[in-house]
Image (cartoon, rainbow, N blue to C red):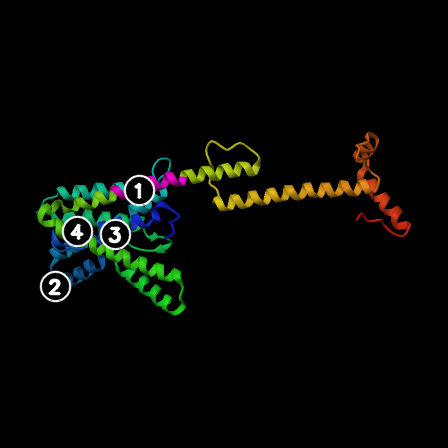
Amino acid sequence: MFRAKQESESIELAVLLALSGGIMDAYSYLVRDHVFANAQTGNMLLFGVNLAAGDWAQCLHYAVPVVCFAAGIALCHTIKIVATEEHLHWRQLALIIEAVLLVVVGFIPEGRSLYANGLTSFACGIQVQAFRKFHGRPLATTMCIGNLRSGTQALVTFASDRDQKQLRGGLLSFFVIACFVFGAVIGNWAIPALGTRTIWVAPVLLITSFLIMFVDREKRRVEVLVEADLEADLEGEAAPAVPAQLGGIAGVEERLAERLAADAERRHGHEIEMDVMHDMGLTSEGGDEQHEGAMERDVEAQIEQHLRDHIARGGFRARK
């Protein structure tokens, strides 16, 4: 299977984040009064039902997670806008905040589920905004409906066109769905033993994702150093201490090959020019200083005059 271009698009992250998404949804529903941490459509539906019944307490019960989910999305996008990447990628910073929030949730007692659900949905909003694409395909790790749609469409397209890319994309979508479901299974298994602290399984997965992004960033750093070295060769300079953003190793190698080919062509052209000049008597193989001096002073004029003389006599003796 091909590798992702960015550390935030790798299949390893998709698996870990989908598992954590399933755990969060199972936890909020089974432990925290049947509220969905991720599936805000369900919360909105239940909000509407209770609104029609005039049950204002239950309306608040389902409205808070929706608002907190939106706030998590807003915070994550703000991090993307303002964060610098000197030490941490903005998605890594988002993972850290999400993990801390879920650790706090584990300390909230059972009778305070409104606060626990709000923080859990806030964390889910951060995750859904930070990680939206894997292996070049839009995928969600906190809900399944979009993956179900895109995966089914890809498989139908494959059945029609036999496009292997569509087959891989469809299978990836269903694989992420399976990971989400398995995360819910893990959460259900852990609840009898851990109770309200079951949510702490999710931060373990998130911190693992955080570390994986460090490993992949180091691989990318090596790649950038190689790119900078090739760029330096292309420019005939020493490799810079801090590599600039480049267009990829393949692009640099291609430009380097073009430069070398152009140099070879120039050398070949110069050799041909010297052969023609020698044939016309404008230079000598022995390196006669007088002829070389004349060539340096007015080579072009000598060639032009020689051609005119030959044309006037009715032709030019080409060298075989």
Q: Which amino acid type is shown beneath numbered disc 4? A: Ile
Q: Crowding at label 4, few (<14), some or many (≥20) Cα neighbours within 10 Å?
A: some
Q: Earlier in the sequence, mark 2 or mark 1?
A: 2
Q: Earlier in the sequence, mark 1 or mark 3?
A: 3
How far apart are labels 1 and 3 at the CA level? Answer: 15 Å
Q: Crowding at label 2, few (<14), some or many (≥20) Cα neighbours within 10 Å?
A: few
Q: Which residue is mark 2?
A: 53
Q: Which residue is mark 4?
A: 186
Residue 61 horizontal/vertical position (percent): 14, 54
Mark 3 residue element: helix
Mark 4 residue element: helix
Label of residue 212 in the image:
1
Q: Which amino acid type is shown beneath numbered disc 2? A: Ala
Q: Are marks 1 and 3 in contact (CB under 8 Å)?
A: no
For image coordinates 34% across by 67% down, the residue present is 156
Residue 201 occupies quadrant: top left
Q: Is residue 43 left or right of residue 128?
A: left
